[in-house]
Image (cartoon, rainbow, N blue to C red):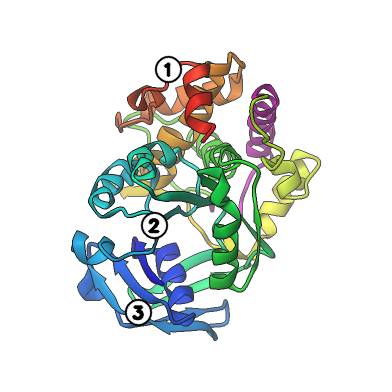
């Protein structure tokens, strides 16, 4: 297949390597094509090569990237989806497959015109593993590969075909989810990142600086875990109210992390090898540290991930007080970044919502 990877970061480089290893013709669409090597490598935590392959091309040209693509993986943050969809649309052909990794963030609405033009949209529920660039454009370090990947599609009828393609590329078990909303509502980064940021920076306002900041995961707090449990329970209550859809695979984070109590969750997150050493998104100034409000942890996980959960809850009339309070905290300190809005896509009621997602 002709496969294009949109984004040359951690996950994009990892996926490009897997695709190239399977001898697909791989193009990496990136703003820095000159920095990409033809030969890409995935290493483990010991620096040992575990996957490698040669890509065909790295480019910043839309036509080169999309005109002949059979399969496109998009590894960019949620706020880029509208722009990427517009770039791909002129080159859509029947059967083109466009995948969002991970599939949270409401990106499916941005690709409505691509779906109408004959494309299949799909998403992975979570990334294949923790991935961090070791050398830009050439080497990525991957740890903790999942046992199973989960995929969903719009239209829903294509999910088994997509499942088989993903399983083949990654040599991993892959299961098809009952409906795409199992991706949209997966309480991963939109709950994990936002609750942690709120508890770290809860007292932040303009002019406040911090002498030091805890490691993001390795020094996780019970206070964060209690807030996470509360938000996670609200997502589960919302799913229970959405009776038009099978959302049985929107698993609680308690279940995902095998932690029945907040204290157990704290111990679990602190122990995950792939999370070790990851810092809190911040900017160093002369007076100390302030939150990096331009980080994806803020601009994607609040303005898109958590906002989408809140807007769906509003459409269904389901109260989500902890989610709402966490968003209100962000709005009080944010740089007024653009937020996701279902209204932009003509979805203003529960009926509109159901109509769009029952494809």
Mark 1 highlights which residue?
A: 348
Judge whether 141 appears above or below 90 on screen: below
Q: Residue 232 placed where, x, y %?
A: 66, 33
Rendering quarter of residue 81? top left
Judge whether 242 appears above or below 278 on screen: above
Mark 3 highlights which residue?
A: 55
Mark 2 highlights which residue?
A: 96
Q: Is residue 100 visible?
A: yes
Q: Residue 152 placed where, x, y %?
A: 57, 48
Q: Residues within 10 Å of mark 2 (few under 14, many from 20)?
A: many
Q: Residue 204 placed where, x, y %?
A: 42, 31
Eye-nearest disc, 2 or 1:
2
Rendering quarter of residue 2? bottom left
Rendering quarter of residue 9? bottom left
> Could you say whether the residue bearing mark 2 is in a helix, strand or loop?
loop
Q: Residue 136 placed where, x, y %?
A: 34, 72
Answer whether residue 230 is magenta in the image: yes
Q: Earlier in the sequence, mark 2 or mark 1?
A: 2
Magenta segment: 215-242
By secondary structure, the bulk of the magenta-drawn segment is best described as: helix
> Could you say whether the residue bearing mark 3 is in a helix, strand or loop?
loop
Judge whether 113 appears above or below 333 on screen: below
Distance between the Cα atoms at labels 2 and 3?
A: 20 Å
């Amino acid at each position: 297949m002709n496969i294009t990877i949109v984004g040359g970061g951690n996950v994009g480089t990892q996926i490009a390597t897997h695709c190239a290893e399977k001898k697909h013709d791989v193009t990496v669409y990136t703003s820095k094509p000159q920095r990409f090597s033809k030969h890409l490598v995935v290493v483990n935590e010991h620096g040992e090569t575990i996957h490698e392959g040669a890509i065909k091309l790295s480019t910043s040209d839309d036509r080169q990237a999309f005109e002949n693509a059979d399969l496109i993986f998009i590894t960019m943050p949620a706020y880029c989806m509208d722009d990427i969809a517009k770039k791909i649309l002129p080159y859509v052909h029947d059967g083109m497959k466009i995948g969002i990794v991970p599939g949270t963030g409401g990106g499916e609405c941005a690709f409505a015109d691509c779906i109408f033009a004959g494309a299949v949209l799909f998403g992975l529920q979570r990334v294949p593993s923790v991935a961090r660039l070791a050398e830009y454009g050439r080497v990525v370090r991957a740890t903790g590969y999942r046992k199973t990947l989960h995929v969903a599609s719009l239209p829903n009828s294509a999910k088994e075909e997509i499942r088989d393609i993903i399983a083949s590329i990654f040599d991993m078990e892959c299961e098809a989810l009952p409906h795409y909303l199992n991706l949209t509502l997966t309480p991963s980064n939109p709950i994990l990142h936002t609750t942690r940021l709120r508890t770290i920076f809860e007292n932040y306002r303009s002019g406040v600086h911090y002498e030091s900041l805890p490691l993001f995961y390795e020094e996780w707090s019970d206070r964060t875990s209690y807030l996470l449990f509360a938000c996670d329970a609200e997502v589960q209550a919302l799913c229970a109210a959405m009776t038009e859809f099978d959302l049985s695979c929107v698993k609680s984070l308690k279940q995902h992390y095998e932690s029945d109590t907040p204290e157990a969750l704290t111990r679990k997150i602190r122990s995950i090898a792939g999370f070790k050493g990851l810092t809190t998104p911040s900017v160093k100034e002369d007076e100390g540290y302030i939150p990096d409000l331009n980080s994806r942890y803020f601009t994607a996980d609040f303005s898109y991930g958590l906002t989408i959960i809140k807007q769906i809850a509003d459409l269904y009339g389901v109260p989500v007080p902890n989610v709402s309070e966490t968003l209100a905290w962000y709005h009080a300190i944010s740089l007024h970044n653009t937020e996701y809005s279902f209204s932009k896509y003509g979805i203003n009621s529960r009926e509109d919502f159901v109509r769009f997602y029952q494809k």
